[in-house]
Amino acid sequence: MSLTSGRFSWLTVVAISASLAAGCSKSGLESSFVYSAKTDSLIPEAQSGIKGQAGVKKMVDDRFGNPQHLKAWSKLPIDFGGVTASVGETPSGKAVKEILLQFEEGITSPSGDAVSSVQFVGGAAAGETAAVLSWDAESGKATLVSALTGSPAQGDQVVIGGGEVIRNGRVLYQRHCSHCHGTSGDGAGPTAEYLNPRPRDYRHGVFKFTSTNSSSKASREDLSRILKYGIPGTYMPSFLLLKDDELYAIVEYVRFLAMRGEFERKLVTELSVDYSKASVADQTASGTKRSEIIEALTAFLTEDFSDVANSAGDELAEAWSTADTEEALVAPTVGRVADSPESRRRGRELYLSKCADCHGVSGEGNGPQTTIFEKLPDADALYPEAGLHDEWGNVTKPRNLTQGIYRGGRRPIDLFCRMNEGIKGTKMPAFKTVFSNEDVWHIVNYVLSIPFEAEPGVSPGSIAPATPVAPAAAE
Ligand code: HEC
Ligand code: HEC
């Protein structure tokens, strides 16, 4: 499936209504998207808007919709599905039932069944979706089931079969993923609370096991690999049995949920300094009238908020598109250093200097760092429990390296990525500024040998040839 032909390259936001009703109260799944706790920390006027001006919630809904009515924000690098076209010479006037459609160069006219609906995104019929009775791919003539309310003009933009990918993704996600990851991708589905580690909350836009460098998002390829193979040593299952187009649609939907969550967080960040409940309480305590604060908020929502939303969308578009480029991929400057007792010895030395503090001298994941109390990110207080916390506030133990189970994959290059770039959203740091690529390979060789060590630091390969032991007498 081509990534560009399916994109709504010049539309703003298109509504996609789903054919299937989502959510089932018995399963504990929500039928609408939830908002983050950060949004709840704002004063009600900033959450819900004031004097007809959108607050955070409406801004998010306007661009992403809800499970039954998803929206396609064309700015985002998501393949929502559907092909864009424009209205060609078409009879004007009332009750138009036949239209001619033209495609941009390079876009092939979709055939047969693919054309079930035409969605008008510009002109007098903007917002209308018309079901298609018949479609002639050659001439581009679409006969609509019922007449349009507004009369389309030549050049008006339409989307054919819009939203198919994302709608498909939603249905599959709801079936296979939401009981763990939640309808909104908040990682809080009905089964989530019994799991350790917890299912990922996508809304931070952060994924741990990627092939991209430390400052980049996950690529589509990364998400697809996670889906196919699952995450060893956790409850994240493998979905190898799904078809390629199903995996593709789910990946787009996960990215959609991630971007929705990040967009919401970005909006809240803009507002929280002045309009969080805590900040407003402080301001009123020091004499500012609440009405003045509300007046300033109204002005901000009126004058600046849609610009804020647009640039948040631009940032997301940039970051997520970059993740799919070659420049974002981790590319070691030297090939893998051959495994040898010397390489492992060098690796162990480096390991003891930089890794043992967390992973422990013997690699069991019990270094001294695991017993300290960390500071909470947003407060002048400590976490109630000892240990290293991740982006989502969960304690994540440094991996026990004696078991040989690696969540991000066990190929040497996978381990190279983990060490060179760190594990995003966790305290496992990137070592690319500390070690040369060559040294990282030595550590990879050492780490891969840990499960086979007779005792810490003594991997079989590093033992000098011992005096042969007499074989046990055959019984
Ligand atoms: C039985 C529960 C469960 C189900 C079902 C499940 N997951 Fe997960 N998923 C998890 C857990 C647990 C993790 C976190 C593992 C970790 O942090 O190491 C996770 C992590 C992930 C990640 C994060 C990968 C990364 O690099 O950070 C993605 C993406 C993901 N799941 C997608 C999906 C999708 C899509 C589906 C449905 C097709 C799905 N999961 C179904 C439990 C589940
Ligand atoms: C500040 C603490 C810290 C330091 C220092 C640290 N790690 Fe980690 N490491 C972690 C944590 C936490 C995890 C688990 C992250 C997760 O999956 O949530 C981890 C995970 C790993 C994994 C598992 C990767 C996978 O795919 O499952 C490997 C391998 C690893 N670290 C190796 C190293 C090596 C080698 C070094 C030194 C070069 C090192 N770590 C330094 C905290 C640390």
Image (spheres, rainbow, N blue to C red):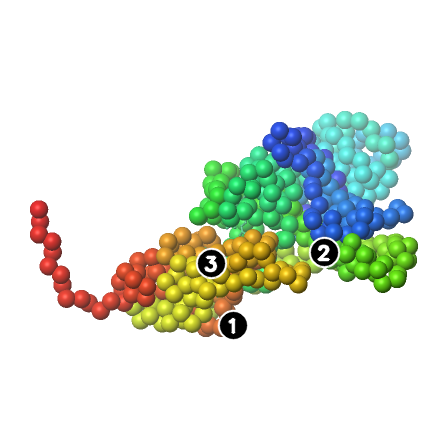
Closest to the camera, between mark 2 and mark 3, is: 3
Circles 3 and 1: CB atoms closer than 8 Å? no
Q: Amino acid at mark 2?
A: Lys
Residue 172's place in the image compared with 316, above or below, is: above
Pointer 3: residues within 10 angstroms few (<14), some, or many (20+)? many
| Pick the front one: 200 or 144 | 200
Tell me what residue is drawn at x 65 percent, y 46 percent: 257
Q: Amino acid at mark 1?
A: Thr
Residue under label 1, please give it.
433
Whole-angstrom CA distance, mark 1 to mark 2, is 29 Å
- The quarter of the displayed image where residue 160 is located: top right
- The quarter of the displayed image where residue 317 is located: bottom right
Residue under label 2, please give it.
266
> Which percent across, then down, holds residue 128?
80, 35
Provide the secondary structure element on which disc 2 rests: helix
> Which percent across, then down, holds residue 10?
75, 50
Tell me what residue is drawn at x 43 percent, y 59 percent: 365
| Pick the front one: 413 or 157 | 413
Q: Is mark 3 within 8 Å of ligand 2?
A: yes
> Which percent across, then down, holds residue 246?
55, 39
Label number found at residue 398: 3
The quarter of the image holding the N terminus is top right
